[in-house]
Image: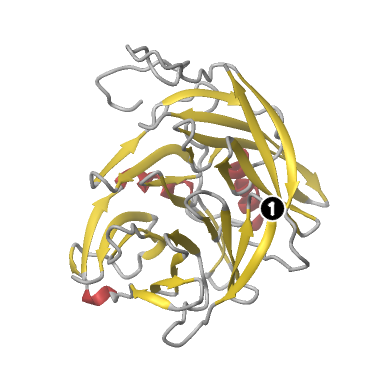
Amino acid sequence: MKNLLFAISMLFLFSCSPNTEKKADFSQMTFSLDTVMVDSKDEILDLKSGLWSSDFSADKNYLYNFSSNDHSIEKIDLDLLEFVGRFPFEKEGPNGIGDYIGLIQYLPEERFYINSNLKNGIFNLQGQKVGDLNFKYEELQGDSLPIQQLMTYGFVFDEKPNQIFAVFRDWLKNKTSFGILDIDKKTYLDKPIPEFDFLKDFTTVLNGDRGFPIAFLGPWVWANKDNGKIIMGNNASSDLYIYDFASDSLWFETFESKLTANRKTGTYPAEAASKEEFDVLNRTFGEGITFMNPVWDPAKQIYFRFSFLQEFKEEEGKSVNEKAVVYLSILDPDFNLVSETVVDVLDKRPNFHFVKDGKIWIFENIDDELAFVRLSIDSN
């Protein structure tokens, strides 16, 4: 459990205080679902990335999804549930954004921080670069940043548009770093996150006949920016790192779940002896508890966080994901775990999701059309 000087109740979102305002009690929760379809206006929306390369306007009225089909941003009105327009971007040239786009981040006035292939910049919706954030590893001063550590997530705060707050990952050595790049000063400030070093214990490589890796099994590290914070985690444990921009502070959180394990279990050799062993390890990893990123509800002032246990069946000699047991945890603004429960209305792992209008919206691809399953939560 986190080291705090005070204890909190696991049943109530807030402890008793002189404030007479009634706070939500999440000790008892019931759920209901509804599904909404987005009118694509006969456009073919890019759904193959599962919306993981997308972001929202600050008010969650609009979704901006990057399409790798034609290097454009698709704008979706989430209130009217309809396609608004397509905005193309160039790959090369002075306004080029590169070939492979991992993430886009919305900034005020429909500007976007986009990084790809070590290209970094801020662009408007007309495809024009309005801020150059490119850097070269060898020119950085300050803390060391090994060139093999690739930036997997980068974020920009509009108050300091010359800085990139980034997560770096050395996949071969299973090292994860968080740091701040100052583009103007050409400096790097490292903020270590050593508690993720254990991820190497869950990593297995399958080598081919010539000794080169042909398959890789291991946890993935994720990060998202929400509520003025960058939240970093991984799918193998409930642990979180949180960076708060306002206070320039980074801290580590652990949790003690009453319903699930707090970390995946099992023994994973560095190298699998055969494809059969690799397949067994892959299934074992998938069956263990898997944790997702917390999403912020500004109305209730809480974070919702999914985790799940997958169940598999054998089909034509292969393990196929059949269904999942889904759990929901409630975290208060200080990342205290205040409640957790099974979500009995969900029977498969949640896809990309966010909170809007008091509901958790979960992406769904229905016959190649964009849809959302919306989870309503009723509490006392």
- The percent coordinates of residue 109 (x first, y second) are 44, 63
Q: Which residue lies furthest to the bottom in this view?
A: 93
Q: Which colour scheme is used?
A: secondary structure
Q: Can residue 353 be seen in this view?
A: yes
Count of labels shown?
Answer: 1
Is 255 drawn above or below residue 116 in the view shown? above
What is the quadrant of the N terminus in the image?
top left
The structure residue drawn at horizontal position 53% and vertical position 42%, both measured from the top left corner, is 292
Q: Residue furthest left?
A: 142
Check disc 1: other Cα within 10 Å, few if <14, some if 14-19, many if 20+. Answer: some
Q: In terms of secondary structure, where does tag 1 sit?
A: loop
- The percent coordinates of residue 25 (x first, y second) are 51, 17
Q: In this view, does 110 lie to the left or right of 307?
A: left
- The percent coordinates of residue 90 (x first, y second) are 52, 82
Is 46 drawn above or below residue 99 in the view shown? above
| Quadrant assignment, res 333 | top left
Of the pair 358 and 132, the residue shown nearer to us: 358
Amino acid beneath label 1:
Leu
Q: Can residue 322 be seen in this view?
A: no
Residue for badge 1: 81
Is 363 drawn above or below residue 15 in the view shown? below
The structure residue drawn at horizontal position 65% and vertical position 28%, both measured from the top left corner, is 343
Q: Is residue 55 left or right of residue 282?
A: left
- The percent coordinates of residue 232 (x first, y second) are 40, 47
The structure residue drawn at horizontal position 45% and vertical position 78%, both measured from the top left corner, is 128
What is the quadrant of the C terminus in the image?
top right
Is 121 drawn above or below residue 180 in the view shown? below
Q: Residue furthest right?
A: 316
| Quadrant assignment, res 284 | top right
